[in-house]
Image (cartoon, helix red, strand yellow):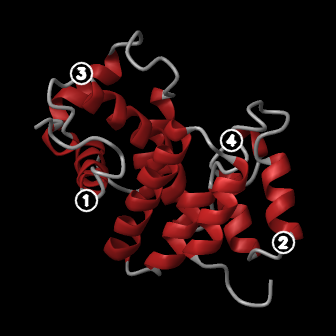
Amino acid sequence: MSEQPTREDAWQLLNQYTDNPSLIKHALAVEAAMRAYADRLGENRETWGTVGLIHDFDYQQNPTEETHLHVGTGILREAGWPEEWVLAVASHADYMGVPRDTSMAKALFAVDELTGFLTACALVRPDKAIAEVKVKSVKKKLKDKAFARGVNREDVRRGAEELGVELDDHIAFVRDAMATIADRLELPPAE
């Protein structure tokens, strides 16, 4: 790849490997949160958003620790994606053993599990409105191991810590970023 990949390149790659609507919405939520953190930290929002969009592009076809990201990072490298982006993608899973030594990598790890958890919190609301999800409610649900079982609570807490933000602020910030694309996440208020 001679030029830096674009969001359109990422969108095509995601859709080439993923057709599960929930996984696509997760990618969009992570993209929105990454763009918001890039703005907050004075980083390149297009780069960060693109990395958020592709972070799990191979998951549907490679859903195990033995394959997810191992296959995906190989595909990205073969296609000539920037190594910093590939490393950020790889680092969002501890089992890859890639250090999160850039703010982009830390942000990706911090928003990944939380976006899924916030989606679950919105879906149990009668109006399904992500913008109306309360931080206090999210923290209460984080303590309930039966709620959204697939979300790693420790990763949510550690992500905020590694990024250097208070958990309450992190939850509110990511919720607000997701609210900006609520319609694409199919989480608008019921009418």
Report the residue marked by disc 1: 180
Residue 119 lies, in percent from the top left, at 35, 35
Report the residue marked by disc 4: 94
Label 4, label 3: how many angstroms apart (C-alpha)? 25 Å
Tell which circle, 2 or 3, labels the residue nearer the N-terminal end.
2
Q: What is the quadrant of the N terminus in the image?
A: bottom right
Residue closest to the far left: 191
Q: Is residue 18 visible?
A: yes
Left or right: 131, with 145 as reference point: left
Report the residue marked by disc 3: 140
Q: Secondary structure at mark 1?
A: loop
- Binning the other alpha carbons within 10 Å of mark 1 as few (below 14), some (14 to 19) or many (20 upward) gives some
Q: Amino acid at mark 1?
A: Thr
Label 4, label 2: how many angstroms apart (C-alpha)? 24 Å
- Binning the other alpha carbons within 10 Å of mark 4 as few (below 14), some (14 to 19) or many (20 upward) gives few
Q: Amino acid at mark 4?
A: Asp
